[in-house]
Amino acid sequence: MKLDGLEVGGVSVGGLETCLELPQWKLAFDLGRCRNSTVSCHTVLFTHAHTDHMGSVAHHLARRGLLGAAPPRYVVPRENVDDFQALLEVWRRLDRSELACEVIEAGPGDEVGLRK
């Protein structure tokens, strides 16, 4: 779908999965489901830490790694950063891989620049 010339895609089923994409900006909101097109999103902004919004982080990381894509950036609510980092460490041990990414904490009013 196009909104004011900007392509928007994704899926949102309350309590099950949410992932919205702005492919032109390589940007996604949430990763409750990692669609094929979402793998190309370099930056993911998380609205909150429920599983239906963060449940596919490891899948996103692993698929980007398999494709040789640059490590993604995850913008995580400030109150969830420590637990998000701990979750990443567990996935790295289980996967026996680096699962490289950049984690940026953000809160209300904070600005995070996009690439280019």
Image (cartoon, rainbow, N blue to C red):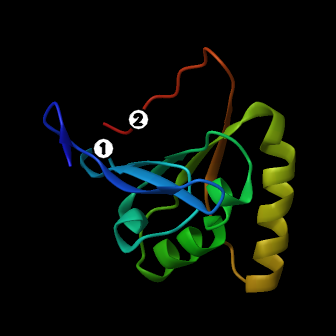
**Which residue is outermost to the top?**
109
Label 2: few (<14), some (14–19) or many (≥20) C-alpha neighbours in 10 Å? few
Q: Is residue 15 left or right of residue 92?
A: left
Residue 48 location in percent, x, y?
Answer: 69, 42
Residue at 72 percent of width and 59 percent of height: 51
Q: CA distance from mark 2 to mark 1?
A: 8 Å
Residue at 79 percent of width and 52 percent of height: 84
Residue 15, by quadrant, is bottom right
Q: Relative to the observer, which residue lies in front, 76 or 89?
A: 76
Number of the label disc, if any, that sits on residue 114: 2
Instruction: Name the kind of residue labelled 1 in the image.
Output: Trp
Residue at 62 percent of width and 50 percent of height: 102
Residue 6, by quadrant, is top left
**Vertically, is 99 above or below 1?**
below
Instruction: Name the kind of residue labelled 2 in the image.
Output: Leu
Residue 76 location in percent, x, y?
Answer: 67, 41
Residue 67 location in percent, x, y?
Answer: 41, 79
Q: Is residue 86 left or right of residue 28?
A: right
Badge nearest the viewer, 2 or 1: 1
Q: Is residue 40 left or right of residue 78?
A: left
Number of the label disc, if any, that sits on residue 79: none
Residue 11 location in percent, x, y?
Answer: 43, 58
Write down the residue under mark 1. Answer: 25
